[in-house]
Amino acid sequence: MKLTSALNRIHRPAVVKNVKTSRGMEPVRKIRVITAGKVLALAAAMALLAVSCGGDDSDSTSTEPPLVSLAGSVSNHGTKDLGTATKLEVELDDLYFSPTFIKAKPGTQVEISLKNEGDVKHTFTIDETSTNVELDKGQKSSVKVTLPASGAVAFYCSFHRGSGMQGAFSVSATTAAASGGTPTTVASSSGGYGY
């Protein structure tokens, strides 16, 4: 009998104090604290789920080693192999391009769809082809670029290049990265860092 009454006490909500009401003395329970704790735990679980489900929506973007060695820092957000395709979507975000490195066939004319998904203005600049496209936040544009027969073509944001916002097209038939070595193609650009 003592065990049953002990179990009944465990399952009863905690009483903080008795309050006088029109019905007489009634217990005030600690319901708000328990509810707030449950809401907080639920919010934390939802935030964790949102973070773990996030990711890059690109289908064929990888995080393999860079194909091209660029001067300065590079915010690497993957490599995309165009194969025989001639169209490419490039995301400009705050301090990176995605994809950052692009493999393409030599001499290909590539139509590049650009979208600025960042919070500030960015550029897509290629010195070798005199390409310079400025995009405000949320703006889209496209540009056609003819790639050389071999080597690499660097592109960058003229505002944020010094912060690593640069990438390159690699048009070499084979690359050291593909064979498991370190990248050996070096892209050069005559432009400055454009702070």
Image (cartoon, rainbow, N blue to C red):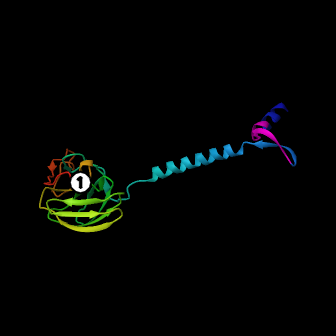
Percent position (x, y) of residue 16? 75, 38
User: Horizontal and vertical percent for residue 195?
Assistant: 23, 51
Nearest the viewer among 12 and 174 is 12
Is residue 96 on the magenta stretch? no
Along the horizontal axis of the image, is 13 left or right of 73? right
Seen at 37% across and 55% down, the residue is 56
| Closest to the observer, 23 or 31 | 23
Give the magenta part as a residue range: 9-21
Question: Residue at 27% across / 57% down in the picture?
Answer: 80
Left or right of 8: which side holds 145? left
Inspect the image, locate mark 1, and give the three-letter code of the amino acid beneath it.
Gly
Task: Classify 9 as above or below 63.
Answer: above
Which residue of the protein is positioned furthest toward the left in this rendering?
149
Q: Which residue is mark 1?
A: 167
Residue ranking furthest to the top: 2
Which residue is drawn at the image coordinates 26% and 60% (left, top)? 123
Q: Quadrant of residue 127?
A: bottom left
Q: Identify the secondary structure beneath mark 1.
A: strand
Residue 164, percent from left and from top: 26, 49
Identify whether 116 is placed above or below 46: below
Q: Which quarter of the picture shows residue 158?
A: bottom left
- In depth, the one of 25 and 78 nearer the eye is 25
- Please say whether residue 10 is one of the residues in the magenta stretch: yes
Q: In this rendering, is residue 48 above or below 15?
A: below
* Percent position of residue 11, x then y: 75, 40
Left or right of 46? Residue 1 is right
Q: Quadrant of the N terminus?
A: top right
How many numbered marks, from 0 up?
1
Q: Residue at x 23, y 68 (%)?
A: 143
Number of other residues with Cα within 10 Å of mark 1, as a class: few under 14, some 14 to 19, many 20 or more: many
